[in-house]
Image (tube, rainbow, N blue to C red):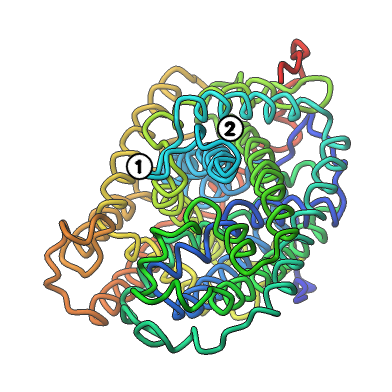
Amino acid sequence: MAMGTTAETTIARPVDAGLRREMGLIGATWASETSIIGSGWLFGAFYASVAAGPAALIGWLIGGVAVIILALCHAELGGMFPVSGGTARFPHFAFGSVAGTAFGFFSWLQAITVAPVECFAVFQYLAYYDPGLYNAKTGVVTGAGFALTIVLMVVFTALNFFAMRIFTHVNSVITWWKVAIPVLAIIVLLFKFHGANFSSAGGFMPYGIKAVFAAIPSAGIVFAYLGFEQADQLAAEVKNPQKNLPRAIILSIMIGTLIYVLLQVVFTAAIPPSLLTHGWAKIATTALATGPFAGLAGLVSFSVLAIILRVDAVISPFGTGLMYLTSTSRVGYGLGRNRYYPQAFTKIDKRGIPWLSLLVAFVLGLVFLLPFPSWHSLVGLVTGASVLMYAGAPLSLGAFRRRLPHVHRPYRMPLASVVSPLAFIIASMLIYWSGLEVIWKLGVAIVIGYVLIGIFMAMDKTRPPMAWRSAAWIPVYLIGMGIISWQGQYSGGAVAAPVNTGNIPFWWDMVVVAGFSLIIYFWAQVSAVSRETMEELIGRQSATHQPEPTPAPTPTPTA
């Protein structure tokens, strides 16, 4: 682990009063790991195989490397500023309130939508026992499934009112299970290894490299890797965060990448060759669709494993949904500390829980259940919002390196001058591969975010100064990515009805995205707020500017 220089200086540090540091290294690692190993492992290999065939393995490797690079940026930032809801606050410190609004809102949007996704995964698997929970023909949960999804969200919320010390123990037990079961599935399915599957039914890459890139955001690969940043979101509740945060982030993503790559290998190899007669895309119409790994275990006569996997199909998404509702409340708290959201979001009860932020996360999570009644329909939007959130980390890291070079960094990312712009290019590439349909929806989302936060800030007389010049590159970046996507190769929608023109040839489109991203990156670095302004923004959230803990009524768990 690279350490800071001997010439380091100190500045006022942001501090979150009321939140309790009760989570150690294992707890922080498991906070990220339980978010990584969720419904993504239950469905990711299946949808990736449908989209790209055996070459989906390349997608998992590319996705893993991409996320590891982004995770290294978060590791440095988390050690530098161990605050609650970090992904919503780093851009605020680096670029001021106007740019911070965009990244903060996407951080909150991403977090708030994941718990509903995990709920859908639970009932899609449970439909094996009760078909009335999920309509396999339409791919959406039924009325009964929707009602039970609401009950599950209530359970998530009730459990989150426990003190972090108790919550960490509950999450630790769940996560040990969640890691053990995929490893068990990998070992058992290796006994049904059909090596010929990697070259049959159209060959290793039946739909071409273009399909591999498209599968990374749209088939659930990046979605599966989401969650490594959870240690950052809970940073104000981590013991010795300067050391434990970077370690937790790096450990969690390394474990997750290894598990997901091996899961794709065994899933590809264990499929009975008879199911591949009509090609990889057709396995979407088989019995594997409702519960891929459990269904596969049943097909290859591992009935005990199939039962275990269907049990895990409830536990794994449950643990991830539980953790994401936790992190959503902390991101909302962080936006309140930025003074983007009303100060009521920073209210802490006697157990150290931001109770109003938690309740708002629950209510708005239910809203997202309505327009997206299936696991797959939400993945693209969540992935796009997540990648935009992640893009804020390398931009912020670069700005801090330029403006605050001597501030203590417990972990210094090696070759930051190269890795940081590379990480931003990677984030832009993932957004581009998501397709124009996802990008325009994100554009609408950011407009809503600016209007919503603008109203809140207009009513706050102590709001931070509006750093317009430091955010001038944001509309250029978003509109530019939209134009490139429109003229590029990825629609993100139905293959039969693309909304993009395809005028930029394949491969050249990615060169254009990379070049455009570098222009935006260096523009952002030049226009970041001054050192004095950074220190002032950070100082506003130091120990002398603290919200007071307030009591909240103790909820009665109803489920």
Category of crowding for the residue at label 2, using alpha-carbon neighbours closer than 10 angstroms: few (below 14), some (14–19), many (at least 20): many
Query: Which mark, residue 138?
Result: 1
Find residue 190 and report its horizontal and vertical position in percent: 69, 79
Q: Which residue type does callout 1 highlight?
A: Thr
Which residue is labeled 2 in the image?
A: 332
Indicate the position of residue 106 as horizontal and vertical percent values. 45, 44
| Amino acid type, label 2 | Gly
- Tell me which residue sits at (36%, 66%) in the image: 282
The quarter of the picture where residue 178 lies is: bottom right
Viewer-proximal residue among 541 and 284? 284
| Quadrant location of the C terminus in the rendered image | top right
Element marked by disc 2: helix
User: Is residue 209 left or right of 462 when viewed as pictured?
Assistant: left
> Residue 223 shows which numbered tag?
none
Image point (64%, 57%), residue name: 36
What residue is shown at x 58% (from left), y 26% (from top)? 148
Residue 463 at least partly seen? no
Circle 1 Cα neighbour tier, 10 Å, few/some/many (<14 / 14–19 / ≥20): few
Tell me where residue 195 sits by quadrant: bottom right
**In which quadrant of the rendered view does residue 189 lie?**
bottom right
Which marked residue is nearer to the observer: mark 2 or mark 1? 1
